[in-house]
Image (cartoon, rainbow, N blue to C red):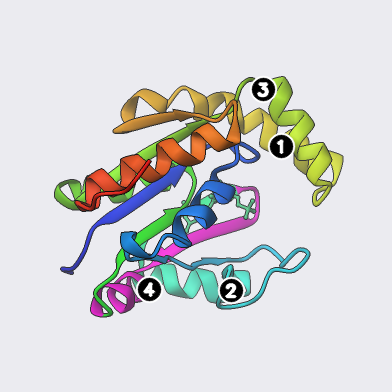
Amino acid sequence: MKGGKLIIFSAPSGSGKTTIVRHLLKQPELNLAFSVSATSRVSRGEEKHGEHYYFIKVSEFKQHIKNDDFLEWEEVYRDNFYGTLKSEVERLWAEGKNVIFDIDVAGGLRIKKKFPEVTLAVFVKPPSIDELKIRLKKRSTESDDKINMRIAKASVELATAPQFDEIIKNYDLDIALKEAHKLVADYVGVDIKN
Ligand code: 5GP
């Protein structure tokens, strides 16, 4: 597999990485395209198949694992599988794009290991676990059980931050967005006005 750069944003759920990734996708000079992951979880809210995720059945997901179709995959939460299909990255590289990922820390580090020369791995750090809890509750897309599962995982994920190339502290969203824009622009080699 050969092509443009790979930009990974990983963080505990609720840290704001999705907001940052969406902001970066709106910057045309970065020439980014979003890597749509496959997942066995059900869609929530406004999420669309093929745009936010490829929503597939667990059986189909397991078949893809058997076929070695994934660049990486994780059972991020119990019975909820998520993975990056090789075909997705190949498709976007064929379009001449730099590919941006919104994936969990284990998956992010796995991709970095596979493509160390062309990958920028960024960890987005939330102000605190308490703040994370507040943000997840405010989002109110998950049940309390699911929120607690995400919080429990967050402490483990925070410990992996030093393995990333860059850490962005998302204490103030505007500042975090600017910092992310600058980091990615530098990595893909374009100038931006501040
Ligand atoms: P959510 O259910 O909130 O959309 O995602 C849960 C977690 O799974 C998030 O941390 C998200 O970034 C991660 N995730 C999404 N797609 C992938 C993927 O393809 N691979 C891995 N390893 N994690 C993913």
Q: Dot 3 corresponds to which residue?
A: 129
* Magenta-span inclusion, residue 124: no
Residue sticking out furthest to the front = 193
Q: Dot 4 corresponds to which residue?
A: 88
| Residue 2 position within the rendered picture, expressed as x and y whole percent measured from the top left | 15, 68
**Element at label 2:** helix
Considering only vertical position in the picture, is 52 above or below 7?
Answer: below
Q: Quadrant of residue 64?
A: bottom left
Disc 1 CB within 8 Å of nearest ligand 1 atom: no
Q: Which of 132 and 181 is in front in this view?
A: 181
N-terminal-most mark, 2 or 3:
2
Identify the residue at horizontal 35%, vertical 23% (top origin): 162
Q: Which of marks 1 and 3 is in front?
A: 3
Q: Dot 1 corresponds to which residue?
A: 149
Considering only vertical position in the picture, is 23 above or below 126?
Answer: below
| Residue 27 position within the rendered picture, expressed as x and y whole percent measured from the top left | 42, 60
Q: How far apart are marks 1 and 4 (CA)?
A: 29 Å
> In the picture provided, is 114 more to the left or to the right than 179?
left
Tell me the crowding category of disc 2: few under 14, some 14 to 19, or many 20 or more residues within 10 angstroms, Cα based. few
Q: Dot 2 corresponds to which residue?
A: 59
The span picked out in magenta is: 77-94
Tell me the crowding category of disc 3: few under 14, some 14 to 19, or many 20 or more residues within 10 angstroms, Cα based. some
Identify the residue at horizontal 28%, vertical 75% (top origin): 90
Q: Distance between the residues labelled 1 and 3?
A: 13 Å
**Contact (CB < 8 A) between labels 2 and 1?**
no
Q: Which of marks 1 and 4 is in front?
A: 4
Identify the residue at horizontal 61%, vertical 69% (top origin): 58
| Residue 129 position within the rendered picture, expressed as x and y whole percent measured from the top left | 67, 22
